[in-house]
Amino acid sequence: MEPGPKVLLVEDEPLLSELLTDALTDKGFAVHAAPNADGALELLRSGVDVDIMFTDIDLGDGMDGAQLARIAREIRPMLPIIYASGRRSLGDFRTVSRSTFLPKPYTLNQVDATIARYLQRERAA
């Protein structure tokens, strides 16, 4: 069986991270989870293979998801990004090109569908 799309999940809430990781894995995705921006950058710099990054905007201490996306694009210029937030809206932060936004609260099916749809659109481009 061929491995599914590889997702870099950046979520600082441990329970939500675990829930998303389990749900996406059940849907066939390979998930690399990071609890914060520094962890995500460490994974990207290590050369881990990812097809898309799904990041919360509010990551607690340190840089937020919008700052993370800009640095991630310096490392991986073609990496698609999905932002998520329950506290901020799309106009509240600067996004990178080839990105999309998923407002919280979201369902696990919305996360799965958004990632799958976005990857499909990226492959068609």
Image (cartoon, rainbow, N blue to C red):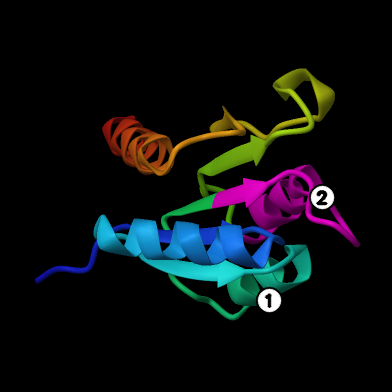
Callout 2 amino acid: Asp
Q: Residue furthest front?
A: 15
Residue type, numbered disc 1: Glu
Q: Mark 1 or mark 2: which comes first in sequence? A: 1
Front residue of this view, candidates 63 and 76: 63
Judge from the rendering whether residue 62 lies leftward or rightward of residue 78; answer left or right: right
The percent coordinates of residue 59 (x first, y second) are 78, 55
Label 1 vs label 2: CA separation? Answer: 15 Å
* Residue 100 image offset from top left, x and y in percent: 55, 30
Mark 2 falls on what kind of element?
Answer: loop
Q: Quadrant of the N terminus?
A: bottom left
Q: Which residues are magenta?
A: 54-75
**Image mark for residue 42:** 1
Picture coordinates of residue 72, whole percent (x, y): 67, 56
Residue 60 in which image quadrant: bottom right
Is residue 53 depicted above or below 93 in this figure?
Answer: below
Q: Quadrant for the C terminus, please.
A: top left
Q: Which secondary structure, mark 1? A: helix
Q: Nearer the viewer, mark 1 or mark 2?
A: 2
Which residue is at a point 82% across and 50% down the rendered structure image?
Answer: 64
- The residue carrying mark 2 is 64
